[in-house]
Amino acid sequence: MEVLARGPPFGTGLRILHDQVMAHDPARTDLRLIIASWPEDAPRGAVTRFCREHNVSREWFYATRKHVTEAGLPHALVARSSRPKTSPAKVSELVERLALEARARLGGAGWDNGPLSVKYELEKLGIESPSRSTLARIFTRNAVVTPQPKKRPKSSYIRFEYAAPNEMWQLDATDYTLRGGAVVAIFQLNDDHSRFQIASLAARSENAEDAVKVVTIGMNRHGTPQRLLTDNGTALNPSRRGWTGDLTALMLSRGVQPIASSVGHPQTQGKNERGHSTLARWLAARPAANDLAELQTQLDTFDKLYNEERPHQSLQMQTPHQRYYATPKAPEPTPPLAPAPLPSKPRQHARKTTPNGVLTVAHMRIQMGRDQANRTFNIVIETNTVHIFDAEGTHIITHPIGPKGSYVGNGKPRGFLANQPKKPQAPDEPATS
Protein backbone atom coordinates (compact mmCIF):
# COMPACT_ATOMS: atom_id res chain seq x y z
CA MET A 1 0.00 0.00 0.00
CA GLU A 2 2.94 2.27 0.66
CA VAL A 3 4.13 1.82 -2.92
CA LEU A 4 0.71 2.76 -4.29
CA ALA A 5 0.72 5.90 -2.19
CA ARG A 6 3.89 7.03 -3.90
CA GLY A 7 2.50 6.44 -7.37
CA PRO A 8 3.19 3.76 -10.00
CA PRO A 9 6.56 1.99 -9.62
CA PHE A 10 8.09 2.89 -13.01
CA GLY A 11 10.07 5.64 -14.72
CA THR A 12 8.91 9.04 -15.93
CA GLY A 13 8.12 7.94 -19.50
CA LEU A 14 5.94 5.03 -18.40
CA ARG A 15 4.33 7.18 -15.73
CA ILE A 16 3.21 9.69 -18.35
CA LEU A 17 1.76 6.84 -20.41
CA HIS A 18 0.04 5.55 -17.27
CA ASP A 19 -1.45 8.99 -16.60
CA GLN A 20 -2.77 9.17 -20.18
CA VAL A 21 -4.48 5.82 -19.74
CA MET A 22 -5.93 6.91 -16.41
CA ALA A 23 -7.04 10.18 -17.95
CA HIS A 24 -9.21 8.27 -20.44
CA ASP A 25 -10.81 6.30 -17.60
CA PRO A 26 -14.41 7.53 -17.08
CA ALA A 27 -13.80 7.32 -13.31
CA ARG A 28 -11.31 10.19 -13.62
CA THR A 29 -14.10 12.67 -14.38
CA ASP A 30 -14.56 13.25 -10.65
CA LEU A 31 -10.90 14.20 -10.34
CA ARG A 32 -11.21 16.75 -13.13
CA LEU A 33 -14.24 18.20 -11.42
CA ILE A 34 -12.24 18.55 -8.17
CA ILE A 35 -9.35 20.17 -10.04
CA ALA A 36 -11.78 22.54 -11.77
CA SER A 37 -12.87 23.84 -8.36
CA TRP A 38 -9.39 23.79 -6.84
CA PRO A 39 -8.96 26.83 -4.58
CA GLU A 40 -6.28 29.33 -5.39
CA ASP A 41 -5.27 29.56 -1.75
CA ALA A 42 -4.87 25.81 -1.22
CA PRO A 43 -2.27 25.09 1.50
CA ARG A 44 1.26 24.18 0.58
CA GLY A 45 1.63 20.46 -0.27
CA ALA A 46 -2.06 19.98 -1.04
CA VAL A 47 -1.38 19.17 -4.72
CA THR A 48 1.25 16.58 -3.81
CA ARG A 49 -1.05 14.87 -1.30
CA PHE A 50 -3.94 14.91 -3.78
CA CYS A 51 -1.80 13.26 -6.48
CA ARG A 52 -0.53 10.58 -4.11
CA GLU A 53 -4.00 9.76 -2.86
CA HIS A 54 -5.41 9.37 -6.40
CA ASN A 55 -2.36 7.81 -8.04
CA VAL A 56 -1.78 10.53 -10.65
CA SER A 57 1.23 12.68 -11.38
CA ARG A 58 1.67 16.39 -10.69
CA GLU A 59 2.19 16.90 -14.43
CA TRP A 60 -1.27 15.52 -15.12
CA PHE A 61 -2.78 17.68 -12.36
CA TYR A 62 -1.40 20.94 -13.75
CA ALA A 63 -2.13 19.96 -17.37
CA THR A 64 -5.74 19.26 -16.41
CA ARG A 65 -5.98 22.54 -14.51
CA LYS A 66 -4.68 24.42 -17.53
CA HIS A 67 -7.21 22.66 -19.73
CA VAL A 68 -10.00 23.71 -17.33
CA THR A 69 -8.87 27.31 -17.58
CA GLU A 70 -8.72 27.26 -21.37
CA ALA A 71 -11.74 25.13 -22.24
CA GLY A 72 -13.99 25.75 -19.24
CA LEU A 73 -16.77 23.53 -17.97
CA PRO A 74 -18.23 21.15 -19.03
CA HIS A 75 -15.72 20.63 -21.89
CA ALA A 76 -12.83 20.26 -19.49
CA LEU A 77 -14.46 17.19 -17.94
CA VAL A 78 -14.01 15.22 -21.18
CA ALA A 79 -10.61 13.65 -21.76
CA ARG A 80 -8.69 15.19 -24.63
CA SER A 81 -7.49 13.05 -27.55
CA SER A 82 -3.87 11.98 -27.35
CA ARG A 83 -3.63 11.90 -31.13
CA PRO A 84 -0.83 14.13 -32.43
CA LYS A 85 -1.81 17.28 -34.31
CA THR A 86 0.28 16.23 -37.29
CA SER A 87 1.44 12.81 -38.61
CA PRO A 88 4.23 13.49 -41.12
CA ALA A 89 4.81 9.76 -41.73
CA LYS A 90 1.14 8.95 -42.39
CA VAL A 91 0.42 7.62 -45.88
CA SER A 92 -1.80 9.99 -47.79
CA GLU A 93 -5.23 8.89 -48.95
CA LEU A 94 -4.08 9.32 -52.57
CA VAL A 95 -1.13 6.93 -52.18
CA GLU A 96 -3.31 4.43 -50.31
CA ARG A 97 -5.88 4.51 -53.11
CA LEU A 98 -3.16 4.10 -55.75
CA ALA A 99 -1.75 1.11 -53.84
CA LEU A 100 -5.17 -0.56 -53.72
CA GLU A 101 -5.69 0.12 -57.43
CA ALA A 102 -2.27 -1.34 -58.26
CA ARG A 103 -3.06 -4.47 -56.24
CA ALA A 104 -6.39 -4.90 -58.03
CA ARG A 105 -4.76 -4.29 -61.40
CA LEU A 106 -2.03 -6.90 -60.83
CA GLY A 107 -4.54 -9.45 -59.55
CA GLY A 108 -6.85 -8.86 -62.50
CA ALA A 109 -3.96 -9.49 -64.90
CA GLY A 110 -3.17 -12.79 -63.20
CA TRP A 111 0.07 -11.73 -61.49
CA ASP A 112 1.13 -11.86 -57.84
CA ASN A 113 -0.19 -8.78 -56.04
CA GLY A 114 1.42 -8.90 -52.62
CA PRO A 115 3.04 -5.89 -50.91
CA LEU A 116 6.40 -6.27 -52.69
CA SER A 117 4.79 -6.58 -56.11
CA VAL A 118 2.63 -3.52 -55.45
CA LYS A 119 5.66 -1.58 -54.17
CA TYR A 120 7.53 -2.33 -57.39
CA GLU A 121 4.49 -1.39 -59.48
CA LEU A 122 4.16 2.01 -57.76
CA GLU A 123 7.86 2.77 -58.08
CA LYS A 124 7.73 1.83 -61.77
CA LEU A 125 5.07 4.55 -62.17
CA GLY A 126 7.31 7.08 -60.43
CA ILE A 127 5.35 7.06 -57.15
CA GLU A 128 7.23 7.00 -53.86
CA SER A 129 5.92 3.80 -52.34
CA PRO A 130 5.35 3.03 -48.64
CA SER A 131 7.32 0.17 -47.11
CA ARG A 132 6.30 -3.46 -47.49
CA SER A 133 4.92 -3.64 -43.94
CA THR A 134 2.93 -0.42 -44.40
CA LEU A 135 1.38 -1.75 -47.60
CA ALA A 136 0.51 -4.99 -45.80
CA ARG A 137 -1.32 -2.99 -43.11
CA ILE A 138 -3.15 -0.96 -45.77
CA PHE A 139 -4.37 -4.12 -47.48
CA THR A 140 -5.44 -5.69 -44.19
CA ARG A 141 -7.24 -2.53 -43.09
CA ASN A 142 -9.16 -2.40 -46.37
CA ALA A 143 -10.11 -6.12 -46.16
CA VAL A 144 -8.48 -7.14 -49.45
CA VAL A 145 -6.33 -9.86 -47.86
CA THR A 146 -7.50 -13.42 -47.32
CA PRO A 147 -6.18 -14.51 -43.89
CA GLN A 148 -4.06 -17.67 -43.99
CA PRO A 149 -3.11 -18.29 -40.36
CA LYS A 150 -1.96 -21.87 -41.07
CA LYS A 151 0.28 -20.92 -43.98
CA ARG A 152 3.87 -21.93 -43.44
CA PRO A 153 6.09 -18.85 -42.98
CA LYS A 154 8.62 -18.14 -45.72
CA SER A 155 11.43 -17.96 -43.17
CA SER A 156 11.02 -21.70 -42.50
CA TYR A 157 12.02 -22.65 -46.05
CA ILE A 158 15.64 -23.26 -47.05
CA ARG A 159 16.16 -21.97 -50.58
CA PHE A 160 18.82 -23.50 -52.79
CA GLU A 161 19.89 -22.50 -56.27
CA TYR A 162 22.82 -23.30 -58.53
CA ALA A 163 25.51 -20.65 -58.91
CA ALA A 164 25.33 -20.15 -62.67
CA PRO A 165 22.80 -20.36 -65.51
CA ASN A 166 22.52 -23.73 -67.25
CA GLU A 167 24.04 -25.62 -64.33
CA MET A 168 20.64 -27.25 -63.94
CA TRP A 169 17.30 -27.05 -65.67
CA GLN A 170 14.00 -28.26 -64.24
CA LEU A 171 11.26 -29.83 -66.36
CA ASP A 172 7.72 -30.69 -65.35
CA ALA A 173 4.22 -30.73 -66.84
CA THR A 174 0.87 -29.49 -65.57
CA ASP A 175 -2.72 -30.00 -66.79
CA TYR A 176 -4.82 -27.42 -68.64
CA THR A 177 -8.44 -27.63 -69.78
CA LEU A 178 -9.27 -26.27 -73.24
CA ARG A 179 -12.51 -24.43 -73.96
CA GLY A 180 -14.14 -27.60 -75.25
CA GLY A 181 -13.32 -29.52 -72.07
CA ALA A 182 -10.35 -31.52 -73.33
CA VAL A 183 -7.51 -31.84 -70.80
CA VAL A 184 -4.04 -31.27 -72.26
CA ALA A 185 -0.56 -30.86 -70.79
CA ILE A 186 1.80 -27.89 -70.53
CA PHE A 187 5.52 -28.58 -70.29
CA GLN A 188 7.55 -25.89 -68.50
CA LEU A 189 11.34 -25.92 -68.68
CA ASN A 190 13.15 -23.39 -66.47
CA ASP A 191 16.63 -22.55 -65.24
CA ASP A 192 17.34 -23.32 -61.59
CA HIS A 193 19.72 -20.38 -61.07
CA SER A 194 17.51 -17.60 -62.44
CA ARG A 195 13.99 -19.08 -62.78
CA PHE A 196 14.26 -18.09 -66.44
CA GLN A 197 11.62 -19.84 -68.56
CA ILE A 198 13.77 -21.71 -71.07
CA ALA A 199 10.79 -23.05 -73.07
CA SER A 200 7.13 -23.95 -72.71
CA LEU A 201 5.15 -26.37 -74.86
CA ALA A 202 1.45 -27.15 -75.19
CA ALA A 203 1.09 -30.92 -75.70
CA ARG A 204 -1.76 -33.40 -76.08
CA SER A 205 -0.59 -35.22 -72.94
CA GLU A 206 2.47 -35.75 -70.76
CA ASN A 207 4.38 -38.03 -73.13
CA ALA A 208 8.02 -38.74 -73.94
CA GLU A 209 7.85 -37.39 -77.49
CA ASP A 210 6.80 -33.90 -76.40
CA ALA A 211 9.18 -33.97 -73.43
CA VAL A 212 12.06 -34.51 -75.85
CA LYS A 213 10.66 -31.78 -78.09
CA VAL A 214 10.52 -29.05 -75.41
CA VAL A 215 14.03 -29.83 -74.15
CA THR A 216 15.37 -29.80 -77.71
CA ILE A 217 13.76 -26.39 -78.26
CA GLY A 218 15.39 -25.13 -75.06
CA MET A 219 18.85 -26.42 -76.01
CA ASN A 220 18.60 -24.88 -79.48
CA ARG A 221 17.82 -21.51 -77.90
CA HIS A 222 20.08 -21.40 -74.86
CA GLY A 223 22.66 -24.17 -75.11
CA THR A 224 22.99 -27.47 -73.29
CA PRO A 225 22.60 -27.64 -69.49
CA GLN A 226 24.85 -29.66 -67.22
CA ARG A 227 21.93 -31.32 -65.41
CA LEU A 228 18.21 -31.88 -65.95
CA LEU A 229 15.90 -32.41 -62.96
CA THR A 230 12.53 -34.11 -63.53
CA ASP A 231 10.09 -36.27 -61.63
CA ASN A 232 9.79 -40.04 -62.05
CA GLY A 233 7.01 -40.06 -64.66
CA THR A 234 7.23 -42.47 -67.56
CA ALA A 235 7.48 -39.55 -69.98
CA LEU A 236 10.39 -37.90 -68.17
CA ASN A 237 12.68 -40.22 -66.19
CA PRO A 238 11.47 -43.81 -65.73
CA SER A 239 14.87 -45.06 -64.53
CA ARG A 240 13.40 -46.14 -61.19
CA ARG A 241 10.92 -48.29 -63.14
CA GLY A 242 13.78 -50.24 -64.71
CA TRP A 243 14.29 -48.75 -68.17
CA THR A 244 15.82 -45.79 -69.98
CA GLY A 245 13.30 -43.36 -71.44
CA ASP A 246 13.64 -41.32 -74.62
CA LEU A 247 14.39 -38.09 -72.76
CA THR A 248 16.97 -39.74 -70.51
CA ALA A 249 18.69 -41.28 -73.52
CA LEU A 250 18.85 -37.87 -75.22
CA MET A 251 20.38 -36.27 -72.13
CA LEU A 252 23.01 -39.00 -71.75
CA SER A 253 23.95 -38.68 -75.42
CA ARG A 254 24.61 -34.96 -74.87
CA GLY A 255 26.60 -35.48 -71.68
CA VAL A 256 23.80 -34.10 -69.48
CA GLN A 257 23.28 -35.66 -66.05
CA PRO A 258 19.59 -36.65 -65.67
CA ILE A 259 18.34 -36.34 -62.08
CA ALA A 260 15.06 -37.80 -60.82
CA SER A 261 13.42 -36.21 -57.79
CA SER A 262 12.56 -38.18 -54.69
CA VAL A 263 9.39 -40.22 -55.01
CA GLY A 264 6.38 -38.37 -53.59
CA HIS A 265 8.42 -35.23 -52.87
CA PRO A 266 7.43 -32.43 -55.31
CA GLN A 267 9.30 -29.89 -53.15
CA THR A 268 12.48 -31.07 -54.92
CA GLN A 269 11.16 -29.21 -57.96
CA GLY A 270 9.78 -26.33 -55.93
CA LYS A 271 10.76 -23.66 -58.46
CA ASN A 272 8.92 -25.48 -61.22
CA GLU A 273 5.87 -26.16 -59.05
CA ARG A 274 5.76 -22.48 -58.07
CA GLY A 275 5.97 -21.56 -61.74
CA HIS A 276 2.96 -23.77 -62.44
CA SER A 277 0.83 -21.79 -59.96
CA THR A 278 1.91 -18.45 -61.46
CA LEU A 279 1.09 -19.71 -64.97
CA ALA A 280 -2.27 -21.16 -63.86
CA ARG A 281 -3.30 -17.84 -62.27
CA TRP A 282 -2.21 -15.93 -65.40
CA LEU A 283 -4.12 -18.26 -67.75
CA ALA A 284 -7.22 -18.17 -65.53
CA ALA A 285 -7.38 -14.38 -66.02
CA ARG A 286 -7.76 -14.90 -69.79
CA PRO A 287 -10.27 -16.68 -72.03
CA ALA A 288 -9.65 -20.41 -72.31
CA ALA A 289 -7.73 -21.48 -75.42
CA ASN A 290 -9.65 -23.34 -78.12
CA ASP A 291 -6.80 -25.62 -79.20
CA LEU A 292 -3.11 -26.37 -78.69
CA ALA A 293 -2.00 -23.72 -81.20
CA GLU A 294 -3.87 -20.96 -79.37
CA LEU A 295 -2.60 -22.22 -76.03
CA GLN A 296 0.97 -22.17 -77.35
CA THR A 297 0.54 -18.52 -78.35
CA GLN A 298 -0.56 -17.72 -74.80
CA LEU A 299 2.41 -19.60 -73.37
CA ASP A 300 4.85 -17.66 -75.58
CA THR A 301 3.32 -14.39 -74.36
CA PHE A 302 3.51 -15.50 -70.74
CA ASP A 303 7.17 -16.55 -71.04
CA LYS A 304 8.16 -13.14 -72.45
CA LEU A 305 6.29 -11.23 -69.72
CA TYR A 306 7.54 -13.53 -66.96
CA ASN A 307 11.15 -13.37 -68.12
CA GLU A 308 11.48 -9.71 -69.05
CA GLU A 309 8.87 -7.63 -67.20
CA ARG A 310 7.84 -9.35 -63.98
CA PRO A 311 10.33 -8.89 -61.10
CA HIS A 312 10.80 -11.85 -58.80
CA GLN A 313 10.99 -11.54 -55.01
CA SER A 314 13.50 -14.37 -54.65
CA LEU A 315 15.77 -12.57 -57.14
CA GLN A 316 15.85 -9.33 -55.12
CA MET A 317 13.19 -7.89 -57.45
CA GLN A 318 15.21 -8.59 -60.58
CA THR A 319 13.58 -10.16 -63.61
CA PRO A 320 14.62 -13.72 -64.57
CA HIS A 321 16.06 -12.27 -67.80
CA GLN A 322 18.34 -9.92 -65.83
CA ARG A 323 19.50 -12.71 -63.52
CA TYR A 324 20.03 -15.23 -66.35
CA TYR A 325 22.29 -12.91 -68.37
CA ALA A 326 24.07 -11.30 -65.38
CA THR A 327 26.32 -14.35 -64.87
CA PRO A 328 28.30 -16.31 -67.47
CA LYS A 329 26.61 -19.59 -68.38
CA ALA A 330 28.01 -22.83 -67.05
CA PRO A 331 30.22 -24.67 -69.57
CA GLU A 332 28.36 -27.11 -71.76
CA PRO A 333 28.94 -30.77 -70.89
CA THR A 334 31.14 -32.98 -73.05
CA PRO A 335 29.27 -35.78 -74.84
CA PRO A 336 30.53 -39.27 -73.95
CA LEU A 337 33.06 -40.93 -76.23
CA ALA A 338 31.11 -44.18 -76.25
CA PRO A 339 27.58 -43.92 -77.63
CA ALA A 340 24.98 -43.41 -74.94
CA PRO A 341 22.55 -46.29 -74.43
CA LEU A 342 19.65 -46.20 -76.81
CA PRO A 343 16.16 -46.20 -75.36
CA SER A 344 15.81 -49.74 -74.08
CA LYS A 345 12.63 -51.69 -74.25
CA PRO A 346 9.93 -50.80 -73.50
CA ARG A 347 8.95 -48.25 -76.15
CA GLN A 348 6.66 -45.39 -75.13
CA HIS A 349 3.67 -44.05 -77.03
CA ALA A 350 0.55 -41.98 -76.44
CA ARG A 351 -2.67 -43.39 -77.88
CA LYS A 352 -6.28 -42.18 -77.91
CA THR A 353 -9.25 -44.50 -77.65
CA THR A 354 -11.94 -44.62 -80.31
CA PRO A 355 -15.51 -43.41 -79.67
CA ASN A 356 -16.25 -47.04 -78.72
CA GLY A 357 -13.48 -47.08 -76.12
CA VAL A 358 -11.06 -49.28 -78.12
CA LEU A 359 -7.30 -48.74 -77.84
CA THR A 360 -5.12 -49.92 -80.75
CA VAL A 361 -1.56 -50.82 -79.76
CA ALA A 362 1.03 -53.39 -80.89
CA HIS A 363 -1.36 -54.48 -83.69
CA MET A 364 -3.95 -55.42 -81.03
CA ARG A 365 -7.35 -53.92 -80.26
CA ILE A 366 -7.84 -53.55 -76.50
CA GLN A 367 -11.32 -52.76 -75.22
CA MET A 368 -11.00 -50.14 -72.42
CA GLY A 369 -14.77 -49.60 -72.07
CA ARG A 370 -17.18 -47.07 -73.50
CA ASP A 371 -16.70 -44.85 -70.46
CA GLN A 372 -13.06 -44.41 -71.57
CA ALA A 373 -13.94 -43.19 -75.09
CA ASN A 374 -11.79 -40.45 -76.67
CA ARG A 375 -9.27 -40.48 -73.81
CA THR A 376 -5.48 -40.41 -74.15
CA PHE A 377 -3.42 -43.17 -72.55
CA ASN A 378 0.35 -43.61 -72.23
CA ILE A 379 1.52 -46.97 -73.55
CA VAL A 380 4.74 -48.77 -72.60
CA ILE A 381 5.60 -51.74 -74.87
CA GLU A 382 8.09 -54.32 -73.69
CA THR A 383 9.21 -57.38 -75.62
CA ASN A 384 6.17 -59.49 -74.74
CA THR A 385 4.01 -57.15 -72.64
CA VAL A 386 1.96 -53.94 -72.99
CA HIS A 387 1.55 -51.64 -69.97
CA ILE A 388 -1.24 -49.03 -70.08
CA PHE A 389 -1.15 -45.85 -67.96
CA ASP A 390 -3.59 -42.95 -67.82
CA ALA A 391 -2.56 -39.38 -68.64
CA GLU A 392 -1.45 -38.81 -65.02
CA GLY A 393 0.88 -41.84 -65.08
CA THR A 394 -1.31 -44.16 -63.00
CA HIS A 395 -0.99 -47.82 -64.05
CA ILE A 396 -4.28 -49.16 -65.43
CA ILE A 397 -3.63 -52.68 -66.73
CA THR A 398 -0.99 -54.97 -68.26
CA HIS A 399 -1.59 -57.33 -71.23
CA PRO A 400 0.67 -59.87 -72.94
CA ILE A 401 1.24 -59.08 -76.60
CA GLY A 402 -1.01 -61.35 -78.67
CA PRO A 403 -1.11 -62.27 -82.37
CA LYS A 404 -1.41 -59.51 -84.92
CA GLY A 405 -5.02 -58.32 -85.22
CA SER A 406 -6.13 -59.95 -81.96
CA TYR A 407 -8.85 -58.44 -79.79
CA VAL A 408 -8.64 -58.12 -76.01
CA GLY A 409 -11.96 -57.65 -74.27
CA ASN A 410 -12.64 -56.13 -70.90
CA GLY A 411 -14.67 -59.05 -69.57
CA LYS A 412 -18.05 -57.44 -70.21
CA PRO A 413 -20.75 -58.73 -72.68
CA ARG A 414 -20.70 -57.30 -76.19
CA GLY A 415 -23.31 -56.59 -78.86
CA PHE A 416 -26.75 -58.15 -78.36
CA LEU A 417 -25.86 -59.75 -75.02
CA ALA A 418 -24.76 -56.43 -73.55
CA ASN A 419 -28.37 -55.18 -73.57
CA GLN A 420 -30.01 -58.36 -72.20
CA PRO A 421 -31.15 -58.48 -68.56
CA LYS A 422 -29.33 -60.91 -66.38
CA LYS A 423 -31.15 -64.19 -65.72
CA PRO A 424 -31.93 -64.91 -62.07
CA GLN A 425 -29.61 -67.51 -60.64
CA ALA A 426 -31.34 -70.80 -59.77
CA PRO A 427 -31.12 -71.76 -56.10
CA ASP A 428 -28.76 -74.57 -55.31
CA GLU A 429 -30.44 -77.96 -55.02
CA PRO A 430 -30.03 -79.77 -51.76
CA ALA A 431 -27.37 -82.42 -51.76
CA THR A 432 -28.61 -86.01 -52.13
CA SER A 433 -27.16 -88.87 -50.22
Image (tube, rainbow, N blue to C red):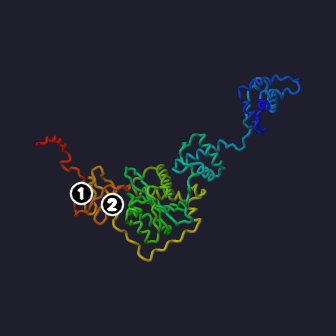
Q: Amino acid at mark 1?
A: Val
Frontmost residue, 120 versus 229: 229
Spot the residue most to the left: 433
Left or right of 375 on screen, residue 403: left
Q: Describe residue 399's horizontal placement relative to residue 157 as left or right.
A: left
Residue corresponding to mark 2: 379
Q: Determine the residue located farthest toward the front in the rendered image.
A: 433
Q: Nearer the viewer, residue 53 or 316?
A: 53
The earlier-in-sequence mark between 1 and 2 is 2
Q: Is residue 49 above or below residue 205?
A: above
Q: Residues within 10 Å of mark 2 (few under 14, many from 20)?
A: many
Give percent across and percent down for residue 41: 89, 23
Describe the element under mark 2 as helix, strand or loop.
strand
The tag on residue 104 is none
**Dot 2 amino acid type:** Ile
Left or right of 217 on screen, residue 76: right
Q: Quadrant of the C terminus?
A: top left
In the rendered image, residue 245, in percent from the top left (x then y), is placed at 39, 65
Measure the C-alpha gap from mark 1 to mark 2: 15 Å
Residue under the point 65% across and 50% down: 127
Residue at position x 59%, y 42% in the image: 140
Residue 302 visible to the viewer: no
What's the residue at 78%, 23% (across, down)? 33
Q: Which corner quadrant holds the N terminus?
A: top right
Question: Quick check: can you spot residue 39?
Answer: yes
The residue that mark 1 highlights is 408
Estimate the x, y position of residue 97 in percent, counting from the top left.
Answer: 62, 43
Quarter of the image for residue 312 reads: bottom right
- Residue 15 image offset from top left, x and y in percent: 76, 36
Front-most of residues 295 and 421: 421
The number of numbered discs placed on residues in the rendered structure image is 2
Secondary element at tag 1: strand
